[in-house]
Image (cartoon, rainbow, N blue to C red):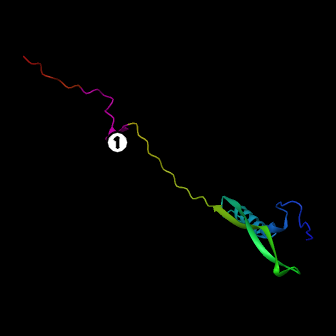
């Protein structure tokens, strides 16, 4: 059986990946425009390629075989997904800090406690006679 090489090496430039390029180019242009226009602070483009190899058999017309000669081969399947993620920043910040409150671990959680005044409090004890 005469076989010819379609492509010598499988690379991103190979035939199976030609259909990916337009959707990838479109995603790149879209993300750049939205970030450039200030609608988003940044964007990410993810290209996911799933590769599978299936073992198949086809019947090839042949004079010696009534239904055709079985030909077993491995067939590649390439699936792709182009995903864009745009980051929009909206930020509200707040903070709490006090020099008069401490945190302590209790039995099964944490609790806030007031720190004693810096003035010393003396408790007078009566002496036992």
* Residue at mark 1: 112
| x and y, in percent, of residue 49 in the image | 72, 63
Report the span colored magenta.
100-121
**Looking at the image, which residue sits at the far left?**
129
Is 43 or 102 nearer to us in this picture?
43
In this picture, residue 4 sits left or right of residue 84: right
Q: Is residue 31 visible?
A: yes
What is the quadrant of residue 125 in the picture?
Answer: top left
Position of the N terminus by quadrant: bottom right
Please give the name of the residue rendered at 33% of the width and 35% of the height, measured from the top-left corner: 115
In this picture, residue 27 sits left or right of residue 69: left
**Looking at the image, which residue sits at the far bottom?**
66
Is 31 or 61 nearer to us in this picture?
61
In this picture, residue 121 sits left or right of residue 14: left
Element under disc 1: strand
Is 22 or 9 nearer to us in this picture?
9
| x and y, in percent, of residue 74 in the image | 78, 66
3 in relation to 129, above or below: below
Magenta highlight on residue 101: yes
| x and y, in percent, of residue 117 in the image | 31, 32
**Looking at the image, which residue sits at the far top?**
129
What is the quadrant of residue 127 in the picture?
Answer: top left
What is the quadrant of residue 10 in the picture?
Answer: bottom right
């Amino acid at each position: 059986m005469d076989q010819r090489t379609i492509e010598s090496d499988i690379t991103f430039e190979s035939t199976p990946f030609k259909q990916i390029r337009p959707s990838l180019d479109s995603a790149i242009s879209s993300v750049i425009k939205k970030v450039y226009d200030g609608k988003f602070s940044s964007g990410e483009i993810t290209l996911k390629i799933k590769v599978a190899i299936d073992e198949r058999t086809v019947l090839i017309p042949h004079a010696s075989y009534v239904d055709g000669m079985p030909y077993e081969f491995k067939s590649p399947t390439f699936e792709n997904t182009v995903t864009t993620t745009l980051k929009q920043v909206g930020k509200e910040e707040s903070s709490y800090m006090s020099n008069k409150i401490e945190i302590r671990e209790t039995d099964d959680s944490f609790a806030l406690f007031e720190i004693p005044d810096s003035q010393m409090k003396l408790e007078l004890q009566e002496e036992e006679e």
